[in-house]
Image (cartoon, rainbow, N blue to C red):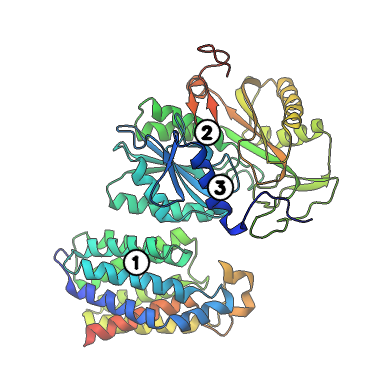
Amino acid sequence: MPMQKIINDPNAFVDEMLEGVLLAHPEQLRRAEDPRVVVRADAPRRGKVGIVTGGGSGHLPVFLGYVGFGLADGVAVGNVFASPSSEQILEATREVNGDAGVLYLYGNYSGDVMNFDLAAELAEVEGIGVATVLAADDVASAPKGSEARRRGIAGIAFLYKLAGARAEEGASLADVVATSNAAAAGLRSMGVALSSCVLPAAGQPTFSLPEGEMEIGMGIHGEPGVQRGKLEPAEQIAEQLLAHIIDDLPYRRGDEVAVLVNGLGATPKEELYILFRSVREILGSAGIAVRRTWVGEYATSLEMAGASVSLLRLNDELSRLLDAPCESPFVIRRGSRGLREGRSQ
Amino acid sequence: MSSASPGLARSLAAAADAVASSAAELNRLDGFAGDGDLGITMSAAARALKEVLDLNEQALPEKLLAACGAAIARHAPSTSGTLVATGLLRAAKVVAEPGGDDVEILTGAFRAAQEGIQARGKAAVGDRTMVDGLQAVCTSLQTSSSAGLKMPEALQAAAEAASRAADATAEMVPRIGRASWVPDRARGHPDAGCAVLAIALQAVAETAGS
């Protein structure tokens, strides 16, 4: 399969993407001295906990797309599927430091952890207090009992929303961390891949998945999943994903949850809603109440086809924070649900 | 150590020079099982170190080590550079604490560096990484300290221990990192990270003894 991409030099993929984003949204985002460091145009916000995220490129809106009001404050952007450097993370840290401490919120991948941890140490030398919360929501990436080894996938979108809203309220770093950890503890995801992504610099599919097959539990970089087999109808896919997710926490009858049905890049929104329809029905039969629903592309893997489902167990605080307004070039919530100030959500 | 330490700055400079002039050999060693760029990375680290040392010769040891760690993190942002930077930052924290004679402080600094590097790199003793060299150095320094050995002799013993540890890795099977993907290709050649440590410590020992 030839590479079907709208690009120039494959090696300029990340930098040209960043240039485009900054040209399109100068009122919301600005770059730091390092072109791979992007922060809110109004950063730093004095007295507010700064939130820094980052990771490899190829997952928009993760990570860059969650830099905005009520979300994260800055991002260090790595090459495709590769960690940013500790120096870039440190620069983002300095740029968003409003003297209330900085939260590192990112996905649990060893290269990212190494660089973020080193950046935290360097920030400490400079007198900036840093705390870390990891997204590790992918139940397919390590068995129950080894939750700390799990990778982060689309569920991180909920964590950005919650941590960002909490920080925007003026909460302390310790309180933002507590809220984020409480949310992460009730967050589980799992995905299914129908086709591979193609790294621009590689020019070849990362893995091959024969026509008519799917892989349950595949990671967002093509990490092997738990089961490969015939492509099933949406109802069976929803059943398989939810069986793993519900059993894992477990989510129980009477729980209230937010649901995220996420597209991996090449799957149309129509299909995501077809998938959500079954997810909703299965949760209903299990006595799990769906209180909030997000359907769309929240964490992608270039042109990978497929989807993931995430469940977030809610309480009053988390529901309130999910409903708070936020705005980035990629994610907009007008606040609350439904209409407000005459604008639709 | 609570006063400025030009001796520490001199030692670090000697280590940087020795590592930089071994760049070709380090690339060659790294090339057997890795991606063959350790000499390039370590040269960048050495240049960063020299710049910091030129500017901070009179700094307190903890400030000097922390500045060196930060500079290496910035200018040599690969896995090995990140790990060396981590080691220096952890050593900086320890030398800031009061206590002991120079050999005891150095022992504590190397131990802290080893622990930090192991935690960050997720390598254990015996995985055939720079951790094996650090373990040998820590053991040697501890032995010297217990025996009441003073600085030039303790450093000489540590340098010899690092060199022996590097030689020993030639017959070890890599269990972590890129080298573990092609374990047979590394056989017969010392681990490049251990070689860096041996080269650096040899230079430091020579400076201290002169």
Picture quadrant where residue A129 is located: top left
For disc 3, the chain is: A
Q: CA distance from mark 2 to mark 1?
A: 47 Å
Residue A291 spot, x, y in % from top left? 61, 19
Q: Residue at x 41, y 32 (%)?
A: A176
Q: Amino acid at mark 2?
A: Pro
Picture quadrant where residue A269 is located: top right
Q: CA distance from mark 2 to mark 3?
A: 14 Å
Where is mark 3, residue-wise?
Answer: A17
Q: CA distance from mark 1 to mark 3?
A: 44 Å
Where is mark 2, residue-wise?
Answer: A329
Q: Residue at x 47, y 61 (%)?
A: B121
Q: Same chain for the residues at labels 2 and 1, yes or no?
A: no
Q: Helix, strand, or loop for circle 2?
A: loop
Q: Is residue A195 left or right of residue B51?
A: right
Mark 2 and mark 3 in contact? Answer it, CB < 8 Å.
no
Q: Helix, strand, or loop for circle 3?
A: helix
Query: Mark 3 packing: few (<14 Cα in 10 Å), some, or many (20+)?
Result: few
Pick whichever of labels 2 and 3 is earlier in the sequence. Answer: 3
Residue B52 spot, x, y in % from top left? 27, 67
Indicate which label's residue lies in the foreground, 2 or 1. 2
- Quarter of the picture containing the N terminus of chain A is bottom right
Indicate which label's residue lies in the foreground, 1 or 3. 3
Residue A327 spot, x, y in % from top left? 49, 28
Q: Amino acid at mark 1?
A: Arg
Per the rendering, the mark at residue B111 is: 1
For disc 2, the chain is: A
Judged from this view, the residue extending furthest toward the bottom is B210
The answer, for residue A271, to whether it is visible in the render is: yes
- Quarter of the picture containing the C terminus of chain A is top right
Q: Helix, strand, or loop for circle 1?
A: helix
